Amino acid sequence: MRILSFFTVFVIILFFAPVVQAQVITDYSFSLCPQFGLVYGHVEEIVYPTNTKAELLSLLLWDVKPVFYYGLLMDFSPVKPMERWRFFSGLSMKFGIPGPSGVMEDRDWQSAENTELTNFSSHDNITKELFFLDFSAGVSFPFFNLLIVKTFVTISYMNFRFNGENGYGTYARHLGNDKYAPIDDAPTEISFNGLGTVISYSQEWFYAAPGVSVGIGYKEYFLAEISFMASPLVLCAGLDEHKERKIQFRDRMTGGILLEPGFRFSVAASKWLGISWEISWRYIHGTRGASYQREAFSSEPIGTGIDMLSANEAGSGMSVLNSALLLKVKL
């Protein structure tokens, strides 16, 4: 993945370089912005119940605490944004650095009698892949040579891949007929240490969202902006694999709500060089849809077998804080 990431950035630079050199529209500039930052939060995997008492059947929280990343922002924007209304656009790529990122906690409420917790397990969470691709385009409107308002649309793709390794589990005694003893009343305790990967999970997200930002600045020397996006146009595909049980769940989910407030402060170090710091919070809640299950025989690899529609509906969500430093180089 890392080799592919560097290759992608290299190809894009080669592709856009001649375009920039041939550019004759002096009102605009094209910039390359290397970026380095971190994301901190969690990703949610949800199973909704059909005949149990609790609001959820299962909730798995995958930590992203933190994951560092590197990336590139390609920016096409007006040279003098405070003079008149202008178009702008940007394409941002972020590539996470794989490694430990906290824990994964799995909770189940399987009782048909009450809403008490019946199963709990905790594992070391290893982020195997994290990728963000965001494209934005819009129009900016200056006021009084000091204030600038932007309206824009963002289209985003995200990909996460996690492994839950080692850890332990606590399971309440099953009393029959979907009834369970309290989880602290002589539960079954299981250690997963030494087993390596116990469970893996991946999510692919796609959404489109309108947004608005308001900034205060002076010419092209500095700009402080606050922004906000919201949208119900959210798609998510999830893949959950339980290694020991050889069960695979494929989820197809839509809807919910995306919210993303943000702040950016930019200063010009010279005519060709600028520095920016940004912070934003990406929150998605209520995305849900059908789940399909595959259960392999003991002699077959996981993922084999026929897709069977699960009786339970799947859900997903996320809450991730992003902070980054960007170096803006005008070409």
Image (cartoon, rainbow, N blue to C red):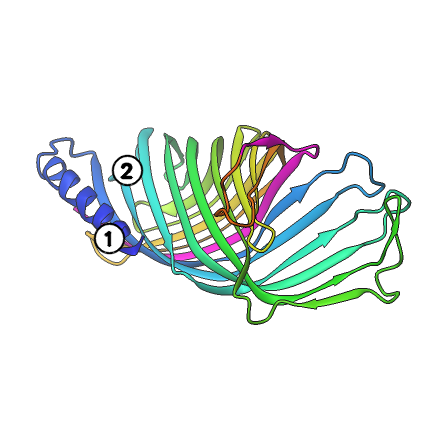
Residue occupying the far front of the picture: 299
Of 205 and 221, which appears nearest the observer?
205
Q: Which residues are magenta?
A: 306-331
Residue under label 1, please give it.
6
Coordinates of residue 39 in the picture (x, y in percent):
48, 56
2 or 1: mark nearer the eye: 1
Q: Determine whether 125 is above or below 61 in the image.
A: below
What residue sits 14% from the left and 38% below the top? 20
Coordinates of residue 44 in the picture (x, y in percent):
61, 48
Of 165 and 20, which appears nearest the observer?
165
Coordinates of residue 59 in the picture (x, y in percent):
68, 49
Residue under label 2, please give it.
77
Residue 57 picture quarter: top right
User: Which dot marks residue 99?
Assistant: none
What residue sits 86% from the left and 67% below the top? 186
Of 308 and 298, which appears nearest the observer?
298
Q: Is residue 101 visible?
A: yes
Crowd class of label 1 (few under 14; some 14 to 19; many from 20; radius 10 Å)? few
Name the secondary structure under disc 2.
strand
Coordinates of residue 200 in the picture (x, y in percent):
53, 53
Amino acid on which the number 2 mark rests in the picture? Ser
